[in-house]
Amino acid sequence: MLNSEQMNEDQNLYFIMRDTNDLVKAATTGRTQIGLSFAKPSDGIYVSISANAQISTDRILIEKLWNPWAENWFEGKDDPSVRVLIAEAESAEYWNVTDNKVTQLFKALKGGVTGEAGEPDAEHKKVDL
């Protein structure tokens, strides 16, 4: 699955996928609500996006998104199995954990002993898009 940074849009994420991918099949049959997650645990950053998925076979869009990484998965951009999943973001949530790793571990251990989970200190926001 590939995402392109070439597109300059506010709310859409693009993924080049094969027509046999389960997400492509689901969106094609009308199950278009999807969830996307991104994480960088080393920096304590977590993002969750709720989106509406659309599938495209538009050759111009595929051309715009095509990159050397896609060559590893397909027999060129004219491969008939190439699809673009367009994820139109509807809402997003992010967490920026400010506790260091030792503090997080301590809170988890304390929760295991006391039965009360210690929530990590984190900046948390929800955004409707």
Image: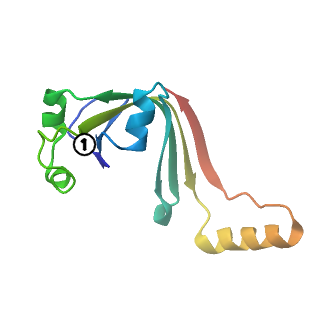
From the viewer's perspective, is 93 left or right of 79?
right
User: Quarter of the image holding residue 79?
Assistant: top left
Q: Which residue is mark 1?
A: 5
Q: State the image coordinates of residue 87 (x, y, percent, origin top left).
A: 39, 32
Q: Nearer the viewer, residue 12 or 118?
A: 12
- Please say whether residue 5 is visible from this viewpoint: yes
Helix or strand or loop: what does disc 1 sit on?
loop
Instruction: Tell me where residue 107 appears, x and y as whole percent.
Output: 74, 68
Res 3 → quadrant: top left
Residue 10, percent from left and from top:
34, 28
Q: Is residue 54 above or below residue 117?
A: above
Q: State the count of labels.
A: 1
Task: Name the side, left or right, on which 102 lies relative to 49.
Answer: right
Q: Classify 11 as above or below 67.
A: above
The reply to whether residue 88 is in sight is no
Side of 13 where 89 appears, left or right: right
What is the crowding at mark 1: few (fewer than 14 residues within 10 Å), some, or many (at least 20)? Answer: few
